[in-house]
Image (tube, rainbow, N blue to C red):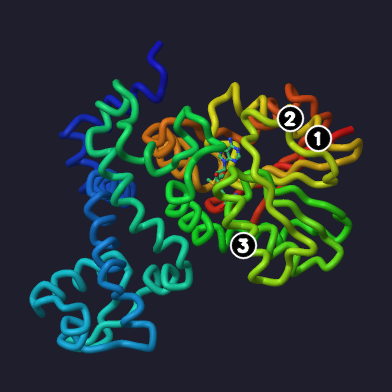
Amino acid sequence: MMHWKDWRNRLVSDPRFQSFAARFLLTRPVAAAQARKAFDLAAGFVYSQVLLACVELRLFELLRDGPRPLADLAQAADLPPEAMERLLLAANSLALTEARGPGVFGLGMAGAALLGNPGALAMVVHHKLVYRDLADPVALLRHGPSAQGLARFWAYAREEDRRAIPDEDVAAYSTLMDQSQSLVRRDLLDFYPMGQVRHMIDVGGGEGGFCLEAAKRYPQLHATCLDLPAVARRAQARFEREGLAGRISAKGCDFKAEAIPQGADLITLVRVLHDHDDAPALALLRSIRAGLPQGGKLLIAEPMADAPGAEPMGDAYFGFYLLAMGSGRPRSSSEIRDMLRAAGFAEAQALRTPRPLLVSLIEASAI
Ligand SMILES: C[S@@+](CC[C@H](N)C(=O)[O-])C[C@H]1O[C@@H](n2cnc3c(N)ncnc32)[C@H](O)[C@@H]1O
């Protein structure tokens, strides 16, 4: 017997049914929504490039203080007025900007939201590199990543002596991560209380933004930012600049080759696990388990594949992004909990976060 979904698909792919559904009163809204969805899928790259043009021309910053006339915007962005008008009309259609009167434009809802999220704006610019690698997705699927693109940008994804990666190879990705982490760390710290934590180790802690913000909120907290030596040097310099080096410090460590230090009652992995293939990810969880005392906690914070309402972010965006990077994969919360059990954690629970698109959370206990 034919499955109802096969029957549905046969119907929906029939051009005669499509014309009928577009006209018939009861099916018209569904047909219109499906057509829009299919068009958005096909045109998504063009929308992204409209956004990139807005960001590179600093259009949202130009509109920060209120609407401005077209000619004024064209001059500020050094574009011919006709080109600026074309860009603004495109941006209006995407709610990045909006018309506020004849020849006058202001920020749209999406533009205003992006203006308040410098990390997302930095990622938009970074996508130039990503889209170069994704230009031929079938080649990427067949032959894997090119050594010159994302795999080069993320120096730690290469199989080489990671302790010896030079400072200049980590600067760009560490800065990008720090910018894009700002909302993540705020959400995490608003959501996960650390008033009882004595010593936290943030594994793969980058330039130390999470340790820094946690230490500022919790005066009892001591923290160690653990990352590759070249990244840890950046974090340590920052802690010293901020005058917090007495309570927080950075330590150079290749966690694929060295043990996680003992002494923490909380270990955090913020946007780290998904960067690693299954075998090294499991080895990392085991090493963390060995570093925790009885009752110690591990907090895993990253975008997860089954985040409710944000599914394409997991398997589509991160699935292809990490493929181009050459290491790791998005995992669902239940896959991560299975790995935690295999690594020796007795309990692991998923915690609901306010913005699963940014970050989901799993807390595991070492019992
Ligand atoms: C995607 S970034 C996340 C950084 C930070 N936690 C955040 O959320 O912005 C991954 C971090 O893990 C670090 N890392 C990757 N492999 C590592 C390894 N084998 N040993 C130590 N750190 C590593 C990288 O240097 C980088 O800082």
Q: CA distance from mark 1 to mark 2?
A: 6 Å
Query: Is 71 located above or below residue 247 in the figure?
Result: below
Question: Which kind of residue does numbered mark 1 sit on?
Answer: Gly
Q: CA distance from mark 3 to mark 1?
A: 26 Å
Crowd class of label 1 (few under 14; some 14 to 19; many from 20; radius 10 Å): some
Q: Residue at x 31, y 67 (%)?
A: 55
Residues at circles 1 and 2 in contact by the CB criterion of under 8 Å: yes
Q: Residue at x 87, y 54 (%)?
A: 198
The residue to which callout 1 is attached is 291
Q: Residue at x 54, y 27 (%)?
A: 277
The residue to which callout 3 is attached is 237
Crowd class of label 2 (few under 14; some 14 to 19; many from 20; radius 10 Å): some
| Foreground label between 3 and 1 | 3
Question: Which kind of residue does numbered mark 3 sit on?
Answer: Ala
Q: CA distance from mark 2 to mark 3?
A: 27 Å
The residue to which callout 2 is attached is 287
Image quadrant of ligand 1?
A: top right
**Residue 79: image x %, image y %?**
13, 76
Crowd class of label 3 (few under 14; some 14 to 19; many from 20; radius 10 Å): some
In this view, the residue in front, 202 or 253, is 253
Q: Residue at x 25, y 49 (%)?
A: 45
Give the structural element (helix, strand or loop) at label 3: helix
